[in-house]
Image (spheres, rainbow, N blue to C red):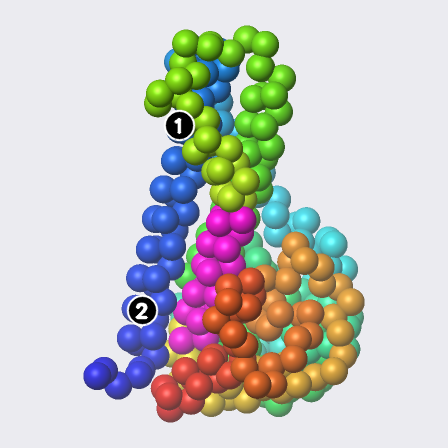
Amino acid sequence: MAIPTAYNQVASNKFKTWLLMFLFTALVFAVVWVFSYVLANVYGYSSDPLGLVAIFLIVVGVMNFAAYYWSDKIILGISGAVPVDEKSNREVYHLVENLCIAAGTAVPKIYMIDDSAPNAFATGRDPSHATICFTSGIVEKLDKLELEGVAAHELSHIRNYDTRLMAAVTILVGLIALIADMFFRMMWFGGGRRNNEDRGGLGAILVVVAIILAILSPIIAQLIQLAVSRRRESLADASGALLTRNPGDLADALLKISADPDPLEAANKGTAHLYIINPFKESHSGGISWFANLFNTHPPIEERVKALRAMQ
């Protein structure tokens, strides 16, 4: 049995993330093809199902383009974050700058949310257009080494392109829900033009499959999104530990943040997955069941801390 290290933690989490993304991509193509085939051959919307596939893919491209360029500005705006520079907060600026020098990456923009709850997140489309955002509470309540561990975690999200990946995954989840809704509408309103000859045999089977997919695919997509989010959090923990060489400080920070009673008022369900710890406080006593963990944006604190302690 391999000894747990930051290196094999990183390799394991990368493999699991790309496996999940492969399954996600397969789900998207399966859903689009089945819906397009049924709408084209049973409900008469087009003689070529590939034409409908092309339309759906164009929608994907437009939505991903918008997310790629503007998601960070939207997130910072709704969070009430303000920029921080060397003059306004020298300690935080130099802490992030020193980590970037060690990592060999550009210094991201630094923002601050005026909130007593300790938390932080990263956003941006790539390392050259990235932002790390801290709450005022995390700066006040963590010591320097713990805050360095948090900053390294968020910088790892940027270096691993997690911010871009999660923006794309979020768009795909929304797209699957949109396509499922469009399918139901087109199926019912296209009933008068359906091709009755294709209602039997394979056509009838695919109609049933398409209806089942329309119901279940948004749920499955969301579960995959949550699984990808958990994997990237674990990857950022391991990558951050590699950067600082002090996994114990990040573990201490996670415990301190999770135990803090203050709620983060700036957070919402759309941005919760970005934060280093889920801002919606949950009880971790007694552990979390396997089924309940499927619906979490982050791995259980106990699991993250155990993995970090094993790297020491």
Quarter of the figure that contains the N terminus: bottom left
- In percent of width and height, residue 309 lies at 42, 89
Question: What residue do we see at 41% from left, 27% from top?
Answer: 206
Check disc 2 and give the amino acid type: Ser
- In percent of width and height, residue 115 lies at 77, 72
Element class at badge 2: helix
Whole-Å distance between the Cαs marked 1 and 2?
A: 39 Å
Check disc 1 and give the amino acid type: Ile
Q: Is residue 202 left or right of residue 55?
A: left
- In percent of width and height, residue 177 lies at 57, 39
- In percent of width and height, residue 149 lies at 51, 81
Residue 225 among those drawn in magenta:
yes
Residue 130 among those drawn in magenta:
no
Question: What residue do we see at 58% from left, 15% from top?
Answer: 190
**Looking at the picture, does residue 58 appear above or below residue 94?**
above
**Looking at the picture, does residue 52 appear above or below residue 302?**
above
Q: Which residue is mark 2?
A: 12
Near-viewer residue (255 or 179): 179
**Looking at the picture, does residue 209 appear above or below residue 19?**
above
**Looking at the picture, does residue 67 appear above or below residue 79?**
above
Q: Which mark is residue 205?
A: 1
Near-viewer residue (43 or 27): 43
The image quadrant that residue 256 belongs to is bottom right
